[in-house]
Image (cartoon, rainbow, N blue to C red):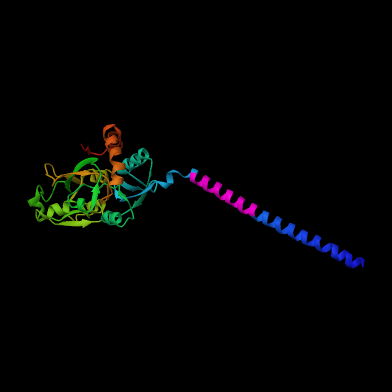
Amino acid sequence: MRAFSAAFTNRPQSAKVRRQTTTDSSHNREFEMNLIKIMQAVVFAVLAAGTPASADVIKSGATATGVPFNFLDPKTNTMSGFMLDIANEVAKRGGFEFDLQTVDFASLVPALQSRRIDIITSSFSITEERSKVVDFAEPIYSFHQGLLVPAGNPKSLANYDDMKAAKIGTNIGNSAIAAGRKHDINFEQYSSIQDALRDLSLGRIDAAMVDMPIADWIMSANSDYKMEWVEGFEPFFTEYYTFSVRKGDTELLARVNPILAQIKTDGTLAELIKKWGISVQIAP
């Protein structure tokens, strides 16, 4: 009888314990879920606060062979140059970051159109043909191309007529190629100005029509190159250089153009020209 009584008395107590355990477990799960939510919120806030600038990254593209404008510095194995200094200054003042991609010159426009990059920060001249496929920022600087020949000018090249029967080298994508066709001048095309000057030094071509500041820089680094500019040679045109964006990207131009105008007038661009020792003129 006592056993039955004890069993009967213990039943409600056991149920009460079960109810209490179930309630405690429910409260624990609710507490843990709330704690997880709080921790997630804290982590998100820390990450967001710690990376405000990384959210505003613009993919830029430049060639690695356009010394002294944009090139891979073998001493540091990093990209450097006059145009990249301008790009860095624009990014700093604009509060964003350029994520620089190295691109072959002939692939710059395709990379822009395919959205691999958003802006070309390479030394890239403004031409009517290019303006059909890209939009240019306001002009930054100008210079013209020259005709480079072996020392002494053995072929006596002086004008466009002389060039018709000669082997003239230039880099792929150079605006001189289209202009030369109008004068029946054909060019041997090279992947870079460096390659064209190498073949000129080896006597494989008679002359090279190239950007003067770039060629001057290359010759200063290669004392064995015995070459000279043809005095009095009239270039096809004076070229203006700047950044370029995808056709219709007015938003990016609106961010870049006011800063370019600033650095042209506040002395920054003049200081960069002096730093790199290049013969270019600030565009009006």
- Residue at 9%, 50% in the rendered image: 160
**From what the image shows, is residue 89 above or below residue 29?**
above
Determine whether, in the image, residue 97 is placed left or right of residue 181: right
Of 7 and 75, which appears nearest the observer?
A: 7
- Residue at 39%, 46% in the rendered image: 56
Q: Quadrant of the C terminus?
A: top left
- Residue at 61%, 54% in the rendered image: 33
Determine whether, in the image, residue 41 is placed left or right of residue 261: right
Task: State the image quarter where residue 258 is shown.
Answer: top left
- Residue at 56%, 50% in the rendered image: 40
Q: Quadrant of the N terminus?
A: bottom right
Task: State the image quarter where residue 238 is shown.
Answer: top left
Of 255 and 86, which appears nearest the observer?
A: 255
Instruction: Report the predominant secondary structure element of the magenta stretch.
Output: helix
Task: State the image quarter where residue 80 is shown.
Answer: top left
Of 99 and 79, which appears nearest the observer?
A: 99
* Percent position of residue 35, x then y: 61, 50
* Percent position of residue 37, x then y: 58, 51
* Percent position of residue 127, x then y: 18, 49
Q: Residue placed farthest to the left in the image?
A: 161
The magenta span reads 30-48
Let me know if residue 221 appears in the view: no
Asked whether residue 175 is drawn in magenta, I would say no
Asked whether residue 31 is drawn in magenta, I would say yes
Q: Residue placed farthest to the top in the image?
A: 266
